[in-house]
Amino acid sequence: MTQTEQPRKIILDTETSGISTAEGHRIIEIGCVEMIDRKLTGESFHVYLNPGRVIEQGAMDVHGISNEFLEDKPVFAQVANDFLEFIRDSELVIHNAPFDVGFLDMELSLLRPSLGQLSDYATVFDTLDFARKKYPGQRNSLDALCRRYDIDNTHRVLHGALLDAEILADVYLFLTGGQEELGFKSGQDKDGQADGSTPQWITKDRPALKVLQANAEEVATHNKYLSDMAQLGEPIWQQQQN
């Protein structure tokens, strides 16, 4: 990888049977979308998993995934290799990364033979941690960031790993890209001509700007204004010249 190249970004989210690995809860859904050069590629990884245990009602209320729905789904061990190949050598973009990473590392630790930890395959960028530093003292949940950046998430009635990953991809671009993502990049069609979709950068070879000269009345008004100011003392710009 050259210095100008950026690592693949894999925007990742999971849903779980509960909130604590210490209580034996497991991952029930993984959703990932791939981003290269700050653009989604259309590649994704999405799977529902049978956790081998009952989902807590509180968790079910959040994501809407039922125990019955997962009965015929694969277990993590059956998808682990495909998942790790998808994220290999990438930077994972996760909102509240310790939660998802903790669950994924727990799932990997249960495999025999062991496949290591998530950090053996990818680095992690935590958008929640980044947002808290950028907007201290403010709400920085995914929903709050969507409101801040005017990202439409009205279709997000319940949490879902793939949907949340797609929403997080938009949030990540605004969170880390500043004005670049607000329409200040040159919009061009396939022939390289401006398409009018976004404002254009002013280039060095642009035509000379038109200069409008003040008329006699405007010059007289300006000189009178300076004369009136002089009654209050020597202007600062003349002090600097002396």
Image: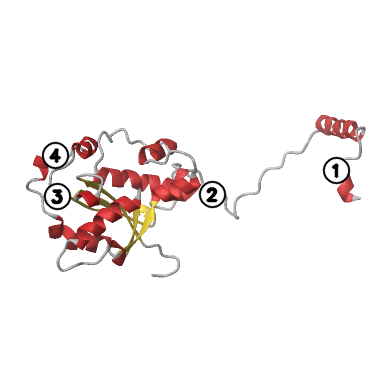
Residue in the image at 25% along x and 48% along y: 20
Q: Nearer the viewer, residue 103 or 220?
A: 103
Q: Position of residue 110 (x, y in %)?
A: 17, 61
Which residue in the protein does label 1 denote? 236
Q: CA distance from mark 3 to mark 1?
A: 75 Å
* Quadrant where the image shows the N terminus: bottom left
Judged from the image, the secondary structure of the residue bearing numbered disc 1 is helix
Which residue in the protein does label 2 denote? 201
Which residue in the protein does label 3 denote? 51
Which residue in the protein does label 4 denote? 66
Of the image marks 3 and 1, the number of the one nearer the N terminus: 3
Q: Nearer the viewer, residue 222 or 195?
A: 222
Q: Nearer the viewer, residue 109 or 120?
A: 109
Judged from the image, the secondary structure of the residue bearing numbered disc 2 is loop
Indicate the amino acid at tag 2.
Trp
Q: Are marks 3 and 2 in contact (CB under 8 Å)?
A: no
Indicate the amino acid at tag 1.
Ile
Q: CA distance from mark 2 to mark 1?
A: 36 Å
Residue in the image at 43% along x and 44% along y: 195
